[in-house]
Amino acid sequence: MVAPMFAFKTYWWEASSLITEQNLSITPSTSSEFWEHTTETTRLGFKANRLRWVQQQEFEGRAVRVIVNDRLGYASTTDTDTATKTLMGRAKRAAQHGRPANIIFPSTQIESLPLDLKLSALTQAGLKELGQEMIAVIRQAKPSPIVDLEIRRSREYLTIQNSLGGVVFSTANRLVADIWVERHLRGEALVIFDTFKTSRLDNDHCRFAEQIRQSLEWATRPATIKSGYYPVILSPRVVATLMAPLIVAFSGGRARSNSLLANKQNHPLFDPRLTLVDDGTLRDRPAGGTTDHEGVPTQRTPLIHNGIVTNFYYDLRTAAQANTHSTGNGWREQLAPPRPHSTNIVLNSGDASLQEMIAATDDGLLIDQLMGTSSDLSSRGAFSRSIALGHRIQHGQITGYIKGAALAGNLYELLNNLLALGNQSFWSGDVCTPYLHIAKLSISS
């Protein structure tokens, strides 16, 4: 059950008084920030279509950042018995050798509760039912595949208090499912894997499972393809995979130095039909919320607008280095210090249906999934990836599936070589994109 409202209020005001109680007040040469994060997670594991294990975990951590004489110090702990004053002392000692930091902590005062009460009230039995529903949809494919699934629901409580008067208390719920599907047909094994994320409990988990079922239905007969250049349709999960390095390149921490986009702001580098946004305000997404992990309000940041590089995303530190403002993208992993990280990446849709893209392809591929993940690109944007699952298209019809071939190209050329953008967008992790129809890419069999 979700904690009652009065518990939120009490916890919040107790956290608000910590800095005063522990003498973390601002001085002409010192400012400070207290951060506390608690996560309660319930995990269910399904193996070969059946529930095999249940696990409950809790993580609680505290951290203090101080700026002493313009130098940053940081200390953290998972020991809840450690006094805030003790952490403050450790952070001050670290600041003696810390990097220069021209950070000004925000004075934001926000209390934010979960948006979706159905997800807040989800029980272990309800979580089991969601997993079973996803498996049931996928297994409608013929022949029925074997499904491994880990589904988890997390409740998160975040408190931030700083010496400039900033106070944030927020709670969030997140639902994540990692799916591994294996099907054996005519002596060949076919594998599909993906991740579903949401912060709102509706029927999206079944729609996500339906996409996997559709991929299996298409992949009933093996096909071959000769090496060469072909028109290619990229699925949203493939687009998300290929764009991962580009998303990292928009980080304010890289924009000033080794980013592929360094010094490219206001340059038209992409197809003029493309607009890419980092949207931290989407509260029904796990990467969204009212503030980031530094207490800066989240915002909608256009990264590409009509093909033109428009903005980068920043946390407090990288924004100070770039002489600009944080975009609300300061996020922490466990007890690590905050760093700039994307939130919800949304690529605009177009006006072509997937069926129209397939019908317009005389000889090509619909690539559904690539092998592995990578955040690295060459300095010129080149990539080469193995195809885990592709669908052969001949004369406007899907005629069989391909696996084991390789896809190669250049990300910038790809995003300037578009035939069409799909009219429907789908989430793959924290990236929402449509299908993309590319004029030509290199395929090696």
Image (cartoon, grey):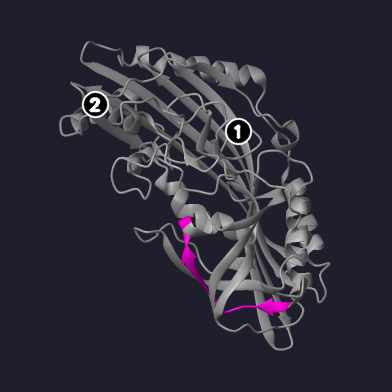
The residue that appears at 53% across and 20% down in the rendered structure is: 11
Q: Quadrant of residue 164?
A: top left
- Residue 144 on image: x %, y %: 80, 73
**Amino acid type, mark 2:** Gly
Quadrant location of the N terminus in the rendered image: top right
Q: Which residue bears the numbered disc 1?
A: 172
Q: Residues under labels 1 and 2: Cα distance?
A: 31 Å
Extreme-left residue of the structure: 96
Extreme-bottom residue of the structure: 187
Query: 346 or 171: nearer the eye?
Result: 346
The residue that appears at 63% across and 32% down in the rendered structure is: 283
Helix or strand or loop: what does disc 2 sit on? Answer: helix
Q: Which residues are magenta?
A: 400-412
Is most of the magenta stretch helix, strand or loop? strand
**Amino acid type, mark 1:** Ala
Using a 10 Å C-alpha cutoff, classify the residue at mark 2 as few (fewer than 14 neighbours), some (14 to 19) or many (20 or more).
Answer: some
Helix or strand or loop: what does disc 1 sit on? Answer: strand
Q: Is residue 69 above or below residue 340?
A: above
Q: Which residue bears the numbered disc 2?
A: 89
Eye-nearest disc, 1 or 2: 1
* Residue 240 shown left or right of residue 72 in the figure: right
Quadrant location of the C terminus in the rendered image: bottom right
- Residue 409 among magenta residues: yes
